[in-house]
Amino acid sequence: MNRRAFLGAAAAVATLPATDVGESYPTESNSGTGGVTADGADEPAVRECDVCGADQPASMVDRTTVSEIAPLQADICWSCQFVHEHTPRKGTCAQCGDALDEDYPGNGFPIEIEFPLGAAELPAFKSAKLCGDCAAWIASDINHRGVHNDPVADDRHLRLIQTMDARMHDLEADDA
């Protein structure tokens, strides 16, 4: 069993709701006013979305899944469901929407990432294709943040930049 399948199964076992005879989730017909379970108990008017972490009208939060966390289920508001189920147009970059680089074999630069999704830090997986500019930006951002968050590397990088600036200043002074 691969790691992704194992994590998915473990997450499902840990978070899928047990079927409870009196349990019901609000529906669109509740219009955010809270609902009533089969046993007559009041449902809250708002529920927290496990992805964005915000309190949303209960009628607009479903116990469901999105492709990035499947088969795990969570309380996800309609807005987050829409964003995480969106599929880019064919042949376009998943980040910026520009056309994928036709010169690169396979049209575009594939990316796969496992990450904690949202406020509940749900185990998630995303795969997409990016254009060259977006792929380069993401890779450079990772590298620069890595250097910045390492005090020794950050200090050395700062000294390199200062040395380069000083040499460039000297070259400009020689040209004047």
Image (cartoon, helix red, strand yellow):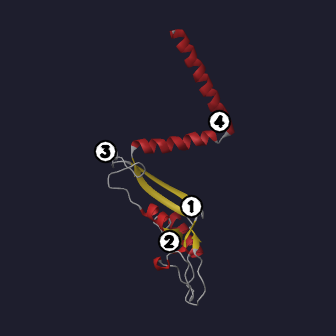
Secondary structure type for disc 1: loop
The part of the image, by quadrant, that contains residue 159 is: top right
Rounded to the nearest whole Å, what is the CA distance between mark 3 and mark 4?
37 Å
Contact between marks 1 and 2 (CB within 8 A): the answer is: no
Label number found at residue 9: none
Question: Gap in Å between the C-alphas at discs 3 and 1?
Answer: 34 Å
Q: Is residue 129 above or below residue 54?
A: above
Q: Earlier in the sequence, mark 3 or mark 4?
A: 3
**In this rendering, the label closer to the viewer, 1 or 2:** 2
Q: Is residue 90 left or right of residue 151?
A: left
Q: Nearer the viewer, mark 3 or mark 1?
A: 1
Residue 116, percent from left and from top: 57, 59
Mark sitting earlier along the chain (4/2)? 2
* CA gap, disc 4 and disc 2: 45 Å
Q: Which residue is mark 4?
A: 154
Instruction: Please state if 118 lies on the left or on the right of 87 as rendered.
Output: right
* Amino acid carrying mark 4 in the image: Asp
Reading the image, the residue beneath label 3 is 102
